[in-house]
Image (spheres, rainbow, N blue to C red):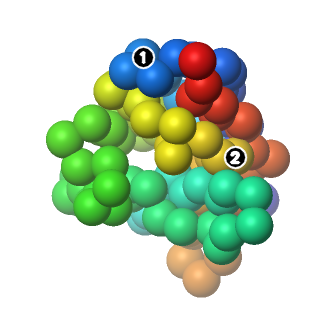
Amino acid sequence: QVVLVESGGGLVQPGGSLRLSCAASGSIFSINYMGWYRQAPGKQRELVADRISDGRTNYADSVKGRFTISSNNAKNTVFLQMNSLKPEDTAIYYCNAVQGRTNYWGQGTQVTVSS
């Protein structure tokens, strides 16, 4: 069992920055994938950025050049640095981890970009 806890969301003005964190605990061995997804009101959940165990990363076109996904040395925390935020980035951001065939999700953290 893996537990994911997100933090770092909040209200920020357009052009501002936020850093989200996702801490994984429990049986975290052999987690081979971690990613960030988001869901805006009335829309489907979408991939923002992800990172597989060999370090390769992938980004949605809408966030390329603005967001960066990274992890700590212990590989039990994944971060999402979000710069140049836009109102359309407003959503609930969810952390996702895959261990074998099992998907785990965090509870989500709200990001609101508004002046």
Taking the spot 80% from the left edge, 47% from the top edge, the residue there is 107
Taking the spot 52% from the left edge, 17% from the top edge, the residue there is 13
Residue 104 visible (yes or no): no
Rendered view: 81 above or below 25: above
Rendered view: 103 above or below 55: below
Q: Mark 2 vs mark 1: which is more N-terminal? A: 1
Kindly give the residue lying farthest to the front in the view shown: 115
Q: Which mark is residue 16?
A: 1
C-alpha span from label 2 to label 1: 17 Å
Q: Percent position (x, y) of residue 43?
A: 67, 69
* SS for callout 2: strand
Amino acid carrying mark 1 in the image? Gly
Q: Residues within 10 Å of mark 1 (few under 14, many from 20)?
A: some
Foreground residue among 105 and 53: 105
Taking the spot 27% from the left edge, 61% from the top edge, the residue there is 61
Q: Which residue is mark 2?
A: 92
Foreground residue among 70 and 49: 49
Amino acid carrying mark 2 in the image? Ile
Q: How many marks?
A: 2
- The quadrant of the image that shows the N terminus is bottom right
Residue 66: quadrant of the picture: top left
Q: Nearer the viewer, mark 2 or mark 1?
A: 1
Taking the spot 47% from the left edge, 64% from the top edge, the residue there is 47
Position of residue 20 in the picture relative to residue 65 (left or right): right
Rendered view: 65 above or below 35: above
- The quadrant of the image that shows the C terminus is top right
